[in-house]
Image (cartoon, rainbow, N blue to C red):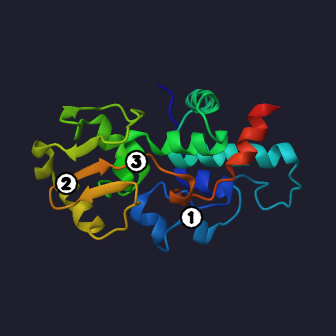
Amino acid sequence: MARYTDSVCRLCRRENQKLFLKGERCYSEKCAMNKRAYAPGQHGQGRKKISEYGTQLREKQKARRFYGVLESQFAKYYEMAVKKSGITGENLLQILESRLDNVVYRAGFAMSRPEARQLVRHGHFTVNGSKVNIPSYLVKAGDVIAIKEKSLSSEKIKAILEKNAGRPVPKWLDVDFENKVAKVITLAAREDIDLPVAEHMIVELYSK
């Protein structure tokens, strides 16, 4: 599958927003947004007037990049959100939050979503006791996500758990950090999602 392989710091600069794609580095002085808080490219520092369509597009791109989702995947999630009862934009964010890689990150078992995606692909997690190595797997209320016992000896995972000990966890997750287990109490509501995304603009974009 196609995947963005260029510098992820360029994505933050393009959206003029920290997307927290590099874990600890995003919180340090080394973060590119601290040094070059303007769009990449030779015209990045030029002042541009953004149209209504451009604003809507930027919101969609920002959401895609927060969660590391491809264009075709994002469109699929939007179609799923439309079919669900409730507010389409909130449904969309709820679906994105339900991705296994995002849940692993939210639970504190990874420093960033890209790292969570990599760990899931390498088979370090189980869902309800069965190994799942698909980052886009959508969890449901009641699902239990755990780090495989064999993976607990990994120095990388040990370091992640040590650094994330005590990190705040969203209320829709119940995390037993001692036993390295997270349970999905309920799916995330809009007020539980702390990302600066104007989801109604994404709906307006797709509704054109």
- Badge 3: how crowded within 10 Å, few (<14), some, or many (20+)? some
Three-letter amino acid code of the residue under disc 3: Thr
Q: Earlier in the sequence, mark 3 or mark 2?
A: 2
The CA distance from mark 1 to mark 3 is 36 Å
Residue at the location (78% across, 32% down)? 207
Three-letter amino acid code of the residue under disc 2: Lys
Q: Is residue 68 shown to the viewer in this render?
A: no
Please determine whether, in this image, residue 69 is positioned above or below residue 10: above
Quadrant housing the C terminus: top right
- Percent across and percent down for residue 194 are 54, 60
- Percent across and percent down for residue 120 are 31, 39
Q: Nearer the viewer, mark 3 or mark 2?
A: 3
Three-letter amino acid code of the residue under disc 1: Ala
The residue where tag 3 is placed is 186
Please determine whether, in this image, residue 129 is positioned above or below residue 33: above
- Badge 2: how crowded within 10 Å, few (<14), some, or many (20+)? some
- Percent across and percent down for residue 147 are 20, 46
Question: Which element type, helix, strand or loop, lies under badge 2?
Answer: loop
- Quadrant location of residue 195? bottom right
Q: Which one is in front, 27 or 93?
A: 93
The residue where tag 1 is placed is 32
Residue at the location (78% across, 62% down)? 45
Q: Nearer the viewer, mark 2 or mark 1?
A: 2
Q: Residue 180 carries which label?
A: 2
Q: Which one is in front, 38 or 94?
A: 94
In this image, 112 relative to 2: left or right? left
Asked if labels 3 and 1 touch by Cβ distance under 8 angstroms, the answer is no
